[in-house]
Image (cartoon, grey):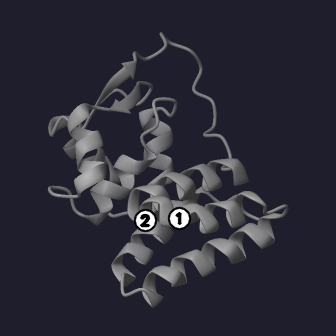
C-alpha cells in the first residue's frame, strides 16, 4: 500500500455504500472516509481509533472497493497530517446521514451546517448520534460517531 497515494471509491465501493451487503461497520466507516482527496496516510491517521486500520484499508483495496485515484507524488518531504476541521466533520456527517437516512436527513444536515463553533458542532453531532438510538438504530449511531469524532478538531 502506497501511503502517499490518494484513493477513490470504485463502483463496487459505491454499491456497498448504498446497499451495505458485504463490509462490516469498521470497513464501511473507513470506506465513507475515502473521498478522492485524502492520502492513505491521512486515512490511517483518521482511523487510528480503530483496531488495525492498515488491515481495514488493505481489505478495501484488495476487495476492490477503492482504487488509486491520484498516484503518489514523487519523493517530497512528508508533511504532518493536517489537523481535522469542522468542515471535514460536517462533510463526513452529511454524507453519512444522507447514505443512512436519505431525504429524511435534511433537517439534521441543515442543523449541522448552521453550527458556528466547535462546541456547538460537537453538541449537535452528539445529538445526531443519539437520534439513531432513538429510532432503534444504535449500531448506526455508533458507526456515525466512530467516523465523525476523529474528524473533530481538538479544543
Q: Could you say whether the residue bearing mark 1 is in a helix, strand or loop? A: helix
Q: Quadrant of residue 121?
A: bottom right
Q: Is residue 15 left or right of residue 90?
A: left
- Where is residue 40 drawn, in percent x and y? 42, 35
- Where is residue 76 drawn, in percent x and y? 56, 15
Residue sitting at x 16%, y 36%: 62
- Where is residue 123 drawn, in percent x and y? 71, 77
Quadrant location of the N terminus in the rendered image: top left
Residue sitting at x 34%, y 78%: 139
Question: What distance separates the C-alpha of mark 1 from that of mark 2?
Answer: 5 Å
Would residue 5 be visible to someone looking at this image? Answer: yes
Q: Which mark is residue 26?
A: none
Of residue 106 and residue 84, the one placed in the foreground of this image is 106
Residue sitting at x 57%, y 66%: 149
Check if mark 1's residue and mark 2's residue have beta carbons within 8 Å.
yes
Decide: few, some or many residues near mark 1? Use Cα within 10 Å; few <14, some 14-19, many ≥20.
some
Q: Which residue is mark 1?
A: 105
Q: Quadrant of residue 67?
A: top left
Of residue 91 and residue 52, the one placed in the foreground of this image is 91
Q: Quadrant of residue 8?
A: top left
Of residue 56 and residue 32, the one placed in the foreground of this image is 32
Using the image, determine if residue 78 lies above or below residue 128: above
Q: Could you say whether the residue bearing mark 2 is in a helix, strand or loop? A: helix
Would residue 52 be visible to someone looking at this image? Answer: no
Of residue 29 and residue 2, the one placed in the foreground of this image is 29
Decide: few, some or many residues near mark 2? Use Cα within 10 Å; few <14, some 14-19, many ≥20.
few
Q: Which mark is residue 101?
A: 2
Amino acid at each position: 500500500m502506497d501511503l502517499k497515494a490518494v484513493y477513490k471509491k470504485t463502483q463496487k465501493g459505491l454499491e456497498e455504500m448504498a446497499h451495505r451487503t458485504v463490509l462490516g461497520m469498521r470497513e464501511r466507516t473507513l470506506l465513507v472516509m475515502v473521498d478522492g482527496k485524502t492520502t492513505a496516510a491521512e486515512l490511517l491517521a483518521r482511523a487510528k481509533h480503530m483496531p488495525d486500520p492498515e488491515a481495514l484499508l488493505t481489505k478495501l483495496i484488495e476487495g476492490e472497493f477503492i482504487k488509486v485515484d491520484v498516484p503518489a507524488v514523487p519523493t517530497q518531504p512528508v508533511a504532518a497530517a493536517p489537523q481535522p476541521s469542522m468542515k471535514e466533520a460536517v462533510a463526513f456527517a452529511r454524507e453519512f446521514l444522507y447514505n443512512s437516512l436519505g431525504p429524511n436527513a435534511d433537517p439534521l444536515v441543515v442543523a449541522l451546517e448552521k453550527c458556528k463553533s466547535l462546541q456547538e458542532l460537537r453538541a449537535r453531532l452528539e445529538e445526531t448520534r443519539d437520534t439513531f438510538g432513538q429510532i432503534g438504530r444504535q449500531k448506526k449511531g455508533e458507526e456515525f460517531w466512530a467516523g465523525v469524532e476523529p474528524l473533530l478538531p481538538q479544543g
